[in-house]
Image (tube, rainbow, N blue to C red):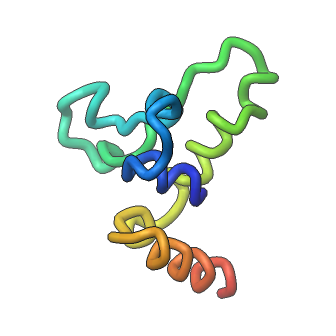
Amino acid sequence: MCFSFKRLNELVPSYFSDYFIRNCTIHTYKTRQRNDIHLPNPKLTLGKNTFRFSGAVIFNNLPTSIKEATSLSTFKNFLRFHFSH
């Protein structure tokens, strides 16, 4: 989840730039999921076990307040609180 947050906030090297892409870059519709990560479409069941797919699913399932954290340390604190309750 931390890598997903880092990638979406451009805190990782540029060669990871295509790992997680927000829905709003794919389409311009104003949906509730526009800031979620666009899920890749795996052709095989094995593809659903990849970090790229499962990381996106886990990140998308987080509450909006956690996904919209302003810093990595705040994001980690929100995660700790969320999973401890």
Q: Residue at x 54, y 82 (%)?
A: 77
Give 29 or 55, whichever is nearer the viewer: 55
Q: Residue at x 25, y 27 (%)?
A: 27
Q: Position of residue 32 (x, y in %)?
A: 30, 50
Q: Compared to 38, does 66 lie above or below?
A: below
Q: Residue at x 48, y 55 (%)?
A: 5
Q: Quadrant of residue 66?
A: bottom left
Q: Position of residue 55 (x, y in %)?
A: 63, 45
Q: Compared to 52, does 72 lie above or below?
A: below
Q: Position of residue 9 (x, y in %)?
A: 37, 52
Q: Compared to 52, does 6 lie above or below?
A: below
Q: Residue at x 25, y 43 (%)?
A: 31
Q: Position of residue 62 (x, y in %)?
A: 52, 62
Give 3 or 12, whichever is nearer the viewer: 12
Left or right: 54 in relation to 75: right
Q: Quadrant of residue 85?
A: bottom right
